[in-house]
Image: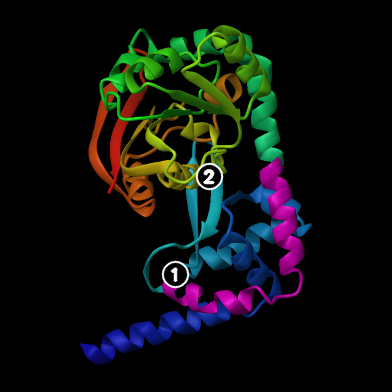
């Protein structure tokens, strides 16, 4: 049995080394170890034809070195994150970064991510006046604000609404926590919020990206991410940031949609992800160093499922 297992490992190693015997595939692995991209975005970064990129991606996928996440009609590629292939790639990481063109690939990939952020920002600037009504359509009468507020600690200290939009929840958060800090990357959203709460000394607004929050380490006693993660290219990074700005013992409440196939929501609501699996949230919360206290699902009249998670920084 032992020799059989060693033979399987040897065959896997041969398969991986064969997959690495091409400069383009080396560049792809270096790129996809840092970014999750669609085929079109990979084409843009590498400056190659789509058939060529697709062929090399298939070779890497067949070797178990690349994984595919399907989200509605879209497919996104990244380096495999589990198993022996992932361990092998981790060992190869320093050498992959020395491949010709690797530095330029990173610059081009960051430009793609910046373009994604700009597109999202333009969308929310455009829909800012109608956003509260639009979101209400999806919730189908479900009082999500009340459900979230019930999970926040009282009078524990400053609470953040991360992705606050026009600030609909901020007065209630301030009433419960004492101080509310709203963060959003849309100037138009924040302008509406400022006009609404100019006289409210317990409400503060800051512009910034959820993946790079304009908050100090441990500044918040609690935080809310209310239907904001599915608009981000890298939601897992936003969860890590939320953990950073929480004080020890602080609570993070995440509300977002379960995985669905409503492709039309991308256009109407600017969605990057068609919801999440419960395992996605569990993994991101754990990776951020938080303890998951509860995760519940609520079926909405719109046909969507709402996931509500509570995590604590210990």
Name the spot of residue 155 as percent of width and height, x first.
30, 24
Q: Secondary structure at mark 1?
A: helix
The extreme front residue here reads 201
- In the image, which disc is placed on residue 63? none
How did the renderer colour the structure?
rainbow
Q: Which quarter of the figure has residue 101?
A: bottom right
Q: Residue at x 54, y 10 (%)?
A: 197
Name the spot of residue 138 as percent of width and height, x first.
43, 15
Task: Check disc 1: other Cα within 10 Å, few if <14, some if 14-19, many if 20+.
Answer: some
Residue that carries the numbered disc 1 in the rendered image: 86
Q: Is residue 95 magenta?
A: yes
Q: Secondary structure at mark 2?
A: loop
User: In the displayed structure, would residue 5 be above or below residue 159?
Assistant: below
Depth check, front residue: 88 or 191: 191
Residue span colored magenta: 85-114
Q: Residue at x 64, y 25 (%)?
A: 186
Q: On the rendered image, what quadrant is the N terminus found in?
A: bottom left
Q: Residue at x 53, y 57 (%)?
A: 78
Name the spot of residue 116 as percent of width and height, x first.
66, 38
- In the image, which disc is placed on residue 234? 2
Q: Is residue 272 left or right of residue 296?
A: right
Q: Is residue 10 magenta?
A: no
Q: Is residue 248 left or right of residue 48?
A: left
Say which label, 1 or 2, has the lower sequence index: 1
Q: Which quarter of the figure has residue 196?
A: top right
Q: Is residue 240 left or right of residue 142?
A: right
Depth check, front residue: 18 or 252: 252
Which numbered mark, 1 or 2, is in the foreground of this view?
Answer: 2
């Amino acid at each position: 049995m032992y020799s059989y297992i060693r033979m399987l490992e040897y065959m896997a190693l041969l398969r991986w080394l064969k997959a690495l015997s091409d400069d383009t595939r080396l560049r792809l692995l270096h790129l996809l170890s840092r970014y999750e991209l669609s085929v079109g975005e990979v084409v843009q970064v590498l400056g190659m034809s789509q058939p060529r990129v697709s062929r090399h991606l298939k070779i890497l996928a067949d070797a178990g070195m690349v994984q595919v996440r399907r989200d509605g009609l879209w497919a996104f590629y990244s380096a495999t994150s589990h198993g022996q292939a992932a361990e092998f790639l981790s060992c190869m990481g320093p050498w992959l970064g020395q491949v010709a063109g690797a530095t330029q690939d990173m610059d081009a990939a960051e430009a793609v991510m910046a373009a994604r952020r700009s597109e999202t920002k333009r969308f929310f600037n455009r829909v800012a006046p109608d956003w509260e009504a639009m979101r209400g359509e999806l919730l189908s009468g479900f009082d999500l604000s009340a459900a979230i507020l019930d999970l926040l600690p009282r009078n524990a200290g400053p609470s953040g609404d991360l992705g606050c939009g026009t600030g609909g929840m901020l007065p209630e958060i301030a009433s419960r926590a004492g101080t509310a800090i709203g963060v959003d990357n849309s100037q138009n959203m924040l302008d509406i919020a400022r006009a609404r709460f100019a006289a409210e000394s317990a409400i503060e607004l800051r512009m910034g990206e959820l993946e790079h929050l304009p908050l100090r380490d441990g500044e918040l006693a609690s935080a809310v991410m209310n239907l904001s993660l599915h608009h981000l290219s890298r939601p897992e990074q936003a969860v890590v940031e939320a953990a950073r700005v929480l004080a020890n013992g602080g609570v993070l409440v995440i509300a977002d949609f379960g995985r669905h196939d409503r492709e039309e929501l991308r256009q109407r609501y600017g969605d990057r992800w068609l919801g999440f699996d419960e395992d996605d949230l569990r993994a991101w919360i754990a990776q951020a160093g938080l303890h998951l206290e509860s995760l519940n699902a609520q079926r909405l009249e719109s046909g969507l499922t709402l996931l509500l998670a509570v995590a604590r920084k210990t």
